[in-house]
Amino acid sequence: MPETLSLALCKPDEMARLREQLGQPGLMGRSIESLRVFLEPHLAKPSDIPGHGEAGSYAHNQHQLNYRLCETAGTLFQITGEQCYADLAADLLTRYADCYLGLGFQKAKNTNPAGRIFHQILNENIWLLSMSIGYGSIRHTLSAGQCAHIEQQLLRPAVVMMTELYAHDFATIHNHGLWGVAAVGTCGLVIGDERYVQLALDGLAGDRKTGGYLAEISLLFAPSGYYIEGPYYHRFAMRALLLFAEALHTHRPDLDIYNFNDQVIRTTIRALLAVVTPNGCLPALNDASRTMGIHDEGLLIAAAVYNARYGDDPAVFALARQQGQVWVHPAALGLAAAADALQSDALPFWPSVELNEGPAGDKGAQGILRAKASDGDISQVLMNYGQHGMDHGHFDTLGITLFNRGEEVLREYGFARWLNVEPKFGGRYLPENLTWARQTVAHNCVTVDGRSQNDGDRNRADQVHGLPHFFVGSGAVQAMSAMANDHFVGVAMQRSLLLVTHEKLDTPVLVDLYRLRSDTEHVYDYAVQYAGQITETSAPVDYNRSQWTVLGEASGYQHLMGVANSRITEPCRITWLQGKRFNSWLSAATSGELLFGQLGGNDASFNLRRDTTLILRQRGSKHLFASAFETHGLFDEPSERCHGARGELTQIRVVGHDDQGSVVELTGRQLRLLVMVSNRADVTAQTEHEVRFDGTTYRWTGFFACEAVA
């Protein structure tokens, strides 16, 4: 029996502590049992090692299943001591070693280099990491000959491929590079090859700057911890980051990895947790799935590591309770016990936060406002005023989303991709990801002259970013404001959002002031992405009864079918029913046109969802779109109950706006508010403002003011 360094991610005696949780009713006991249930059907079946296959094909899915089986079997063997689990992991490793070098390379279907098993080397990195963890758990049960076969015919050739043939991918500062170094480094720790470990830590150049794990975690994240590609890819990168961090914590304590670079790992975990919506999903910034959330393994590991390595946090306890499971690892024992002890099922409440972007924190930010209704429901508003997001970025600077009452009210499309659905373009990104999902009109944003920001040019978009204006994340009225002056030639933009909590409102109201400035006249389209059934419109609607036609030829408009339109002559209100709640959009517009659009144009392959869009179209040079969004009432069809279908608010009106400030009036049945917002780029909390509109002078100090009007 060969000697072993010990397990990949912890010491054997630490793993033994999990044995006490077998059969127990708490979070850890249930999480262990879920692994047993997952493995049970596979214990009596021979391992299946297929050949090549497209993303989403049987072969692809089976290879993914195999690495999960190997890692899980190794984990359960360490916890239970049952030989059947070690046998399953050993059989998988041996069978792969028998055929790996003879498989040849996949045929690349995109720009990512292909592996021997998967269509892109990224998947092979994930595979190697999991197989290495599984191997480390059972290595001491194998003969010297078995170990030599697995290492010489499987693990080492995989490392050589990643570090030599695909050195350029291994050395990149990117989530792909992070997976590569985590896989190679963990493999090196398990088989006892220090050279692999050093390559993974220091990079191919050995400088800890141009590649390697330490460079990855130093350069990938902003000082706030935010990851440029957005939460979807952040949680994906987090899994590799934390698995290797735990391996280093165990085997290389001299690195003190959890305190490295001012606790960068703590900061980036916190940033990821800070963006989660109340229903547990991640906001679909950039290319992203709308359903990805807290049950992803990256988030499970993040919660456990944060609690174990950086101390207790009640919000993380509530998160674990919401997740309903924990990572099966000794690091999660304390978190599981704390979550079990909670006396309430209340959702975690993360504070409002502004997450800066860029290595120095000077490339814009993501702003998130959160407020509670009187019954505890959480409203969350997010505005993107950061960087483009690299090759996964969307043209949506100043785009927003709004979440409350269990629903995303102002919605994000996410990516145009049927993930791993092989008949849909091989499960890869669809052509419509470029022509719709990334375009500005697909977001809750403003287009200029029917064009997307930066004319849809990624290289140009990478050179510009939003500019934080102000952020106030506490109080009865929270607010954030940002500018984007380089995204449309000759047009400067400023968006200011206020989340208003008031005793007369069932749910906090979002006030949105979107200001544009230009020396020439343009067509400005203010787009609202919504879901549900329209129940009321205050403006008369002209429905296109005979034929729907597309709203344009490019920039996403070619996919929007014009369903109806309204001529605007006075401030209007539109209400729609989404789930059990009503949502009203109040606009201060007194001219222009309102377009009702539905996705489906130029979509011969039926790739797009049939989502709905509202577009307020107005012409102007210096222009202010003033809106308010209110969620209200209740519709419960089974009990035949409906109330509050019309809401509290009745109108929003623009008093005036100039380079000093914008003033709007919000009127309801039982309230009347005057909202004043600074437009000065140099504003501070002490700046005094005085503006005069229609013979009336308005004064306030600071970034904004929200005052009751008698």
Image: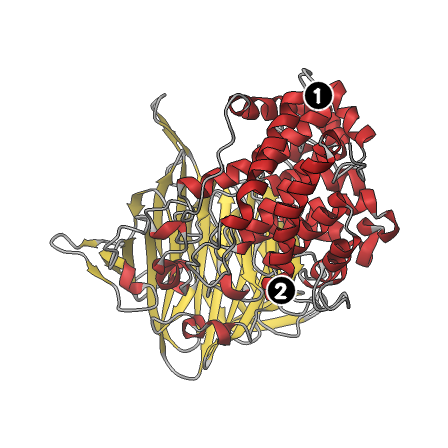
Compared with 53, 591 (above or below) is: below
On the image, which quarter does residue 562 sit in?
A: bottom left
Q: Which residue is mark 1?
A: 80
Residue 419: where, in percent of width, then height?
42, 47
**Amino acid at the residue labelled 2:** Ala
Q: In the figure, 86 relative to 162: above or below?
A: above
Residue 587 lies, in percent from the top left, at: 39, 57
Is disc 1 placed on a helix, strand or loop? helix
Q: On the rendered structure, is 160 left or right of 409? A: right
Camera-nearest residue between 396 and 493? 396
Please identify the quarter of the rendering in which residue 339 is found: top right
Say the numbered circle drawn on residue 628: none
Residue 671 appears in the figure: no
Mark 1 residue type: Thr
Image height check: is 216 above or below 538?
A: below
Identity of the residue furthest to the bottom in this view: 519
Q: Position of residue 84 (x, y in %)?
A: 63, 22
Q: Which residue is mark 2?
A: 167
Q: Secondary structure at mark 2?
A: helix
| 82 is higher (above) or lower (below) than 252 | above
Q: Quadrant of the N terminus?
A: top right
